Amino acid sequence: MRPLIELRQVCKHYRRGGQSVPVLHALDLEIQAGDFLALMGPSGSGKTTLLNLIGGLDRASSGSVIVDGQALEPLSSGQLANWRARNVGFVFQFYNLLPVLSAARNVELPLLLTGLNSAQRARHVAAALAVVGLADRARHRPTELSGGQAQRVAIARALVADPTLLVCDEPTGDLDRKTADEVLTLLQELNREHGKTIIMVTHDPKAAEFATHRLHLDKGQLVGVEHQGP
């Protein structure tokens, strides 16, 4: 079976003060459809950089990133933006919700890039909020929600366009343990019951226990993959 995500000899470096700073070194990685992968490692190990390459937010300096058969390197900036809108849902540590909009309007935002009419968008939004258990909070603004509820809205926004994969950057980093476990249980349910492929950066070993695999990075290199799913 062909992997959903393939990285071949991927290198990434940044320019800083006239110098080239390496972040990822000739990385090879395969991720199967339906995996829930926790990316772990010390600060500066390249976790978020790797997440951004897979999600199409950044480009590799060399090597190849292929997602669902699509090589990302040849795509123009506009093509890459369209590809992200169709294929990737993003969940961030601090939710990135617009405070002036209701939960439903925040969830609807990715659909404004599609050809759906307002009635179709409303149905998608209602379904996404129902999946995360917040159908009754559709009209509430972010300031009227708890941290856990706000992150659930962010997850609904990531899900609403039915993306190929979800990429999550420290999605529970701003939550207390109980609320974090509730959000992680939701991600686990999306993986197990809805078949969503999830890649999550986390520093939290307890959060990583919810994933099917743990991948460890150190100094831009893969140092271990651990299977822990059912």
Image: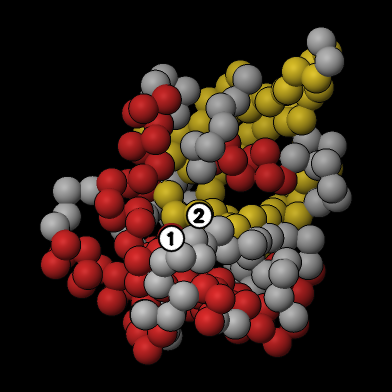
**Residue 201 appears in which quarter of the rendering?**
bottom right
Horizontally, is 194 left or right of 16 in the view? Answer: left
Horizontally, is 218 left or right of 131 in the view? Answer: right
Horizontally, is 160 left or right of 91 in the view? Answer: left
**Residue 167 appears in which quarter of the rendering?**
bottom right
* Residue of label 2: 90
Where does residue 169 sit, x and y in percent of width and height?
64, 55
Disc 2 + disc 1, Cβ < 8 Å: yes
**Residue 140 appears in which quarter of the rendering?**
bottom left
Above or below: residue 138 compared with residue 92: below
Q: Amino acid at mark 2?
A: Phe
- SS class, disc 2: strand
Where does residue 22 sit, x and y in percent of width and height?
79, 24
Above or below: residue 73 compared with residue 118: above
Q: Residue furthest front?
A: 100
Q: Residues within 10 Å of mark 1 (few under 14, many from 20)?
A: many
Where does residue 182 sit, x and y in percent of width and height?
60, 84
**Residue at mark 2 to residue at mark 1: CA–CA distance:** 5 Å
Kindly identify the residue that appears in the image at 28 percent across and 46 percent down.
113
Horizontally, is 138 left or right of 180 in the view? Answer: left
* Residue of label 1: 158
Q: Residues within 10 Å of mark 2 (few under 14, many from 20)?
A: many
Kindly identify the residue that appears in the image at 79 percent across and 61 percent down.
203
Where does residue 127 sit, x and y in percent of width and height?
28, 76
Mark closer to the chain start, 2 or 1 = 2
Kindly identify the residue that appears in the image at 44 percent across and 55 percent down.
89
- Which of the two residues, 54 or 141, is positioned nearer the viewer here? 141
